[in-house]
Image: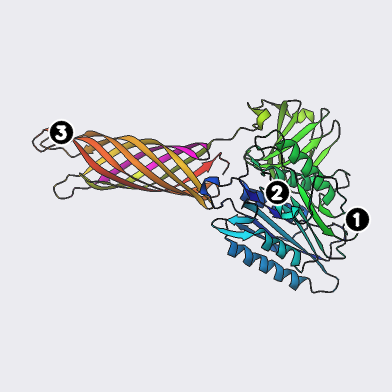
Amino acid sequence: MKACGIALLALLLPAASLAKTVKVAVVIGNNRGHDPARTLRFAERDARKIRGVLTELGGFKPDNVMLLQAQTARQVWAALRRAEERVKQLGRQPGVRSLLVIYYSGHADGDVIELGSTTLSYDRLTRFLRSSSADVRLAFVDSCRSGKLVASKGGRRGRAYPIKAIDEIASRGFALITSSSEDELSQESAEVRGSYFTHYLVSALRGAGDASGDGNVTLDEAYWYTYRHTVGRTSKSIEGPQHPMYDFKLSGRGAIVLTSTQRGKTTLTVTSRHGGRVVVLDSQAESSVAEGDLSAGEPTRLALAPGAYHVYLLDDGSARRAWVVLGEGMNVRLADPDFVKHSLERGVAKGGLFRRRWGHQLGAGFVLRRHFEQGAAMGAAVQYVLQPRPSWQILGRLSWTSAPDSGQSTGYFDLGARVGPFYRLRYSTGALRVGAVVGYDHMFQDKLDGQARNSSAFVYHGALGVEVPMGQFLITIDGGVGGRVFRELSPGGTAHTSHSLDVSMLLGAGWKWGSDD
C-alpha cells in the first residue's frame, strides 16, 4: 500500500499547436514522511517515470524539467519559485503561451504534504497552482485521501465528465485530478513497481490510453484509462478500491492532447490473437515501464525509451514472455510466436504475478578490530548480504586481520567468519541496518617455548551498519561491539578460557542487485 503518498502532475498540451508554448515542470519525489516506519518504496521512482514521459513524449526540454528527490519543503518552494520566474521570463514574447507542470510523489495525510520532517499544506500548494502566471496548469494528485484537495471545491467522483478545454492555450485555466477520494487510501504495488494510479497514468501517456488510435493521448483518454484500471486493480485489495476525482477550470472547446506517441521514435507494437494485456518491465525486471490492453488481433503500440525490456503477454490466467532490445528509432513488432510460455508465480490472484526479487550485496573492505586482551589489528574482509524482504537482511562475512608484537603481547593473525540477521531502515539516501552476528575466529600466534599457540574463539556482536547506494554500487560502514571467548596459553604452557571485549569496524564498497530499492 502506498502509505500516504501524493503526486502532483501537470502535463502537456496539444502536439500540433504548441510550437510557441513554453513548458516548465517541477517533478518532486520523496519516499520519506514523518513516520520512518512508513517509508514508501516507489514514490521517487514514480517521479523519475513522469519526468521520462514529459521529456520523451510531451515536448518538454530537459533543461525546463526540474527533478527534486528527497528534498525539504524549503527546497521545493525554491524550485517552484524558480519555475514561476522561468515561466514569466520565457513567456514574455508576443504570441507565446505558457504551461506549468508540477509533480509531487510522497507522503500526505489529507491536509499536508510530508517532505521528510517538513510539511507543505494542501491549501498553500493549491493557491500556488491557481495563482501562477502560467496560462494553463494541469495537475494530477496521487495520494492517500487526495480527494480532499477537490472535494471542498466541487470536485466530482467518477469518470463521466465533459472535458471542455482549448487545444491552443488561448486562455487561462487549470485542471486537478486526484487518485482517490477524501476517505480512501492510495496504493502502491510491488508488482507494478509503483503506485497503481501513476503506473496506469504513465501507461496511458505512453500510448495505452490512445483509444482513437490517432497517435495522440488526450486528457479525456488518459483519465478514463487511468480511472478504469486503477479501480479495477484495487477493487479486490484489502484496502479497498480507490476512485479518482477531478476539478476542472478550463475554458474553451476541444480536447487537450497530453502526449503524442509520434514524438517517440522508438516504439513497441504487440499483437495477439488471444487478447489480454501486455506488461513491459525494464532489463533487470525490477521496474514496470508500461502496461496496455490487448484486443484480439488488434495491435497495441507503446512509445518507450531505447533499451532492453522483458515483455509479458497475459491472458486467461496464463503468461508468455519475450525479450526485446529497442534501438534508437526502432519500431519492433511482437506477435504470438515471439513469446515463450512463462509460469505464473503463486498468489497471482492477489497481485503477485512477478515475484519480488531477493536483494543481494557483495563487497569487500578494510577492517579495524580491537581485542582488549590482544590489542588492535587491521585487515580485510569480504561480505555477502541476502535481502529476502526490504526490511530484513542476512549478513555473512569472512575476514582476515593481523597485529604486530606490542609490548608483552606477541603478534598474531586470525581468520574469522560471521553470520547474523539485520533489520533494515530505509531513508532517502540510503539505509540503516541494526542486528546481531555470531561467529568463529581462529588465531595463529608466534610459538612460545617451541609450542604453537593456535587458538579458537567464539565471537558475538551487536552490530550497526549504514548503506549509501550509488546506482548499482554502494558504500557500507559496519560496526560491532561484543565479546570474544577463547582459549589462551600462558607462558607456563597452561591453557585457560578467557573472555574479552571485542570491537570492530568495516569500511567497504560493493555491488547490489535484485532488490526493489
Residue 104 % position (x, y): 66, 55
Q: Which mark is residue 150?
A: none
The answer for how far apart the CA atoms under marks 1 and 2 are is: 30 Å
Residue at the (85%, 57%) spot, across then down: 14
Is disc 3 placed on a helix, strand or loop? strand
Q: Which residue is mark 3?
A: 496
Q: Dot 1 corresponds to which residue?
A: 254
Dot 2 corresponds to which residue? Answer: 182
- In the image, is residue 401 part of the stretch drawn in magenta? yes
User: Which is closer to the viewer, label 1 or label 2?
Assistant: 2
SS category of the residue bearing label 1: loop
Q: Secondary structure at mark 2?
A: loop
Residue 420 position in % (x across, y down): 39, 36
**Magenta highlight range:** 381-406
Q: In the picture provided, is 223 more to the left or to the right than 195?
A: right
Most common SS among magenta residues:
strand
Name the residue type under label 1: Gly
Task: State the quadrant of the C terminus.
Answer: top right
Is residue 291 visible in the rendered structure shown here? no
Q: How many marks?
A: 3
User: Quarter holding the N terminus?
Assistant: top right
Q: Are marks 3 and 2 in contact (CB under 8 Å)?
A: no
